Amino acid sequence: MGPKQDVSKFAYSVVAIVIALLVGAVLIAVSGYSVKDAYSNLFMGAFGGVYSLATTIVMSTPLLFTGLSVAFAFQCGLFNVGAEGQLYVGALTSAVVALGLGWLPPVLRVVIALLAGAGAGALLGFVPGYLKAKLGAHEVITTIMLNYVATFLTTFLVKTYFKDPGPVDQTVLLPSGSRLPELIRGTRVSLGIILGIAAVALLNHIMRRSVLGYEIRVVGENPHAAEYGGVSVSAKTVQAMMISGAVAGLAGSVEVMGTLYRFIPHFSPGYGFTGIAVAVIAGQNLWAVIPAAILFGALQSGGQTMQLFAGIPMELMTMVQGLVILFVAAPALGSLLFRLKIRAKEGGGLE
């Protein structure tokens, strides 16, 4: 995608957001609420001060990782719907490893725990990748099923083996040496946001400047041409799903080590699924994952304030958020589904 196309897409996104907010304003007014109060609280709740901005960053951080995870899979023509499950296995693995390595220096402990979380996510990503490569099983179906497996498996493991004594199913609180450093004291804005931006930069470099990235993009565009050119479609499918899973696993690691400070079953409000919307908005531009994640984080952060101080019902608040998602993401989603459909007609499934 060239610079002119990037600017055009950005301009469209801005216009789409404005239109969505205008439609939302009509719905708010018709429902008998003050549009001014609603949107002023939405903005103030997202960007109105250090604490509000910090809350937006905290809510954007896991979406940055899950959005990047799904967006990277898109590069290979794959639809990873399993970021939610990969997030959970990464989160529990990092928590257990961090708690078990208390004898190591803090920096080394944190690094190993993060790598373990990424490894767990990659391992879960390997399964649908392998099934796609060897059996032709569609990754959407297998990743959806694995979400349930991962979610309930981590819950079972916590209840059975890693439960903190007490009435709540959760692990022991991570000691300070096993946590990600806090960038803004008292806000839980952790090093995770920096790691997320670094992950975007690294994967973008891989996709644009490495043989692996070139081969993954070729497979995503035309698997038959890739195979004819000597690229192993099976290998790249597995590798892309493992990298995608590793990034989603890091989303869970960062949440556990930078925000929650322990693993809690069912802690995610749907970060993996919202990450799909983030990735759809970003399209083929991995850098676009960052503003897309911030957009969704701002909607969540500001939406809470809008509900609390403007008295807007949760259902109406969610409708406004949904309108923004719909108007911004619809064209990108249609383009993505069209591209995946064309690939399927061309025999994109491995034989």
Image: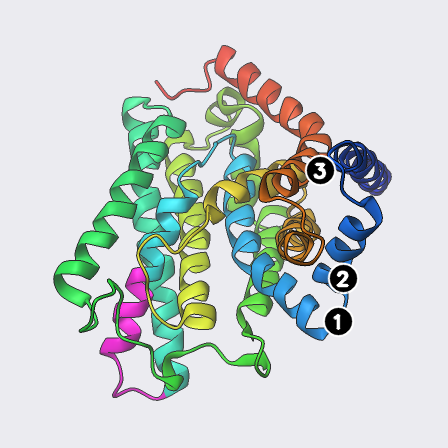
Residue 132 percent coordinates (x, y): 34, 28
Count the labels in the image. Answer: 3
Image coordinates of residue 319 in percent, x first then y, are 64, 36
**What mark, if any, has residue 49 been given in the picture?**
1
Mark 1, secondary structure of its residue = loop
Observer-side mark, 2 or 3, equals: 2
Where is residue 351 shown, x and y percent of the image?
A: 34, 18
- Residue sticking out furthest to the top: 345
Marks 2/3: CA–CA distance: 18 Å
Q: Is residue 148 magenta?
A: no
Q: Which mark is residue 324?
A: 3
Query: What residue is pinned by disc 2?
Result: 44
Q: Can residue 312 be seen here?
A: yes
Question: Quick check: is 94 in the magenta stretch?
Answer: yes
Is 62 above or below relative to 24?
below
Say above or below: 29 vs 270. Answer: above
